[in-house]
Amino acid sequence: MHRSRFSLSRRQLMASAGALALSGAGWLPDMNDRASLRELGEKSGLLYGAAVQSRTLREAPRMAQAVARECSLLTPEFELKWNTLRPEPDVFNFSRADQLLRFAERHNMRMRGHVLVWYKSVRDKWLIEALNNNPPESLLADHIRTVAEHYKGKLYAWDVVNEAIKAKDGLPDRMRASPWLTAYGPGYVQRAFEYAYAADPITPLFYNETNLEYDDEETRLRRQGVLNLLDKLKRNNTPLHGFGLQMHLQVGRPYSPKSLASFIAEIAKRNLEVHITELDVSDVDIPGDRDTRDRLVADHAREVLETVMAHAPVTTLSTWGLSDAYTWMEDRYFRADGARLRPLPLDRDYNRKPLWSVLADTIEGRK
Ligand code: G3I
């Protein structure tokens, strides 16, 4: 995701300084007096949620309080993936995901299921070997059935398949070179949805995809691959109900509101509910002090969200994490100046940031 350093236009930096002065003068509503994202979403109908880990909710009470205050729904960050759920062929370990479901139920929240089939969940030796040796259909079918039956009727939605498209792999229909494709052929996507629906016909089933927001060749090809996949699934009467747009954003990447708008409009034409599933905004590549970075993160999120919200029936907006204290990005990306990343709506002390205000405006319906 982070390929090279990006320069920022003088306009962007001046705008951020100007807006900072305004907010400093108190001319903008003080975000700390505003209702929570949860209250705003349950009033407007655009529910807000965040990805969380069971261990974090157990060990960080202030994070648990912030999640309960701000979120209407939560997504297990990794507890429902194959490599966590099923360490051995005959062992299903639901305990960590069940802890998250109990937290959600205790706080009258919903939980999104993430994710039944994903190429990056193939981590354990037994599964790698099985998928490389002409596995029976039952390996895929029984896993999905077991997991979907365990949570039948208890989840707000399922991400059934994640990130199946990658144009640069050069395969037919721009399919990603995935162990699932190797083992089961391109029909694995449709069959995964069919197995999930057979086990739980109540829960809406989503296809979730990443890296669709920017204006480069790979993204343009990926967008077309995604649309073709959705059309094929619908042509075959696959039980597909929604599309998950991950929205991992990065300040400074080449962005064209026009091309994103036309892609999102194409998604809308396919009568799919849209969930924004993994929003965060990387500031790894931009210079500047903390407040300038926060303002540029917020401004970029606002411009992308305005485009998406204007063209798609978005019903939930989830960030991938809630506080900068817990972001997956810090496992992989590092600023040249050594400063900690600030991609999420709350800072490391759970204070609301300018990005929080952007989410509040989006959820409340304000531009
Ligand atoms: O909790 C265990 C710990 O007990 C163990 O000692 C340690 C050693 O490996 O692993 C810990 O689990 C890690 C888990 O995150 C919790 O930190 C897993 O190894 C690690 O693979 C897992 O990474 C997650 C990653 O998906 C792969 O599942 C990230 O948290 C999560 O943010 C990331 O999320 C993905 C979405 O699912 C799909 N879209 C992209 C997004 C970001 O990569």
Image (cartoon, rainbow, N blue to C red):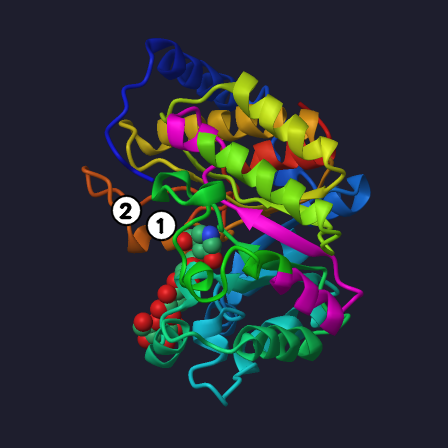
- Name the disc covering residue 333, or none: 2
Percent position of residue 130, x then y: 40, 78
Distance CA(mark 1)–CA(mark 2):
6 Å
Report the front residue among 318 and 84.
84
Q: Amino acid at mark 2?
A: Tyr
143, above or below 208, in the image: below
> What amino acid is found at the position of numbered circle 1 in the picture?
Met
Indicate left or right for 156 with 55 as reference.
right
| Magenta stretch bounds | 191-220
Residue 215 among those drawn in magenta: yes
Q: Nearer the viewer, residue 167 or 13?
A: 167
108 to 19, vertically: above or below: below
Q: Position of residue 28 (x, y in %)?
A: 60, 23
User: In the visual, does 117 lie left or right of 238?
Assistant: left
Residue 317 occupies quadrant: top right
Residue 171, visible in the rendered structure: yes
- Give whichever of 284, 116 is nearer the camera: 116
Task: Identify the residue under disc 1.
Answer: 329
Query: Which secondary structure lies at badge 1?
Result: helix
Q: Quadrant of the C terminus?
A: top right
- Kindly identify the residue that appears in the image at 52 percent across and 84 percent down: 93
- Mark 1 in CB contact with mark 2 (< 8 angstroms): yes
- Ligand 1 found in image quarter: bottom left
**Mark 2 CB within 8 Å of ligand 1:** no
Counting other residues with Cα less than 10 Å from the Cα at mark 2, is it few (<14), some (14-19), or many (20 or more)?
A: some
Question: Residue 337 location in percent, x, y?
Answer: 19, 37
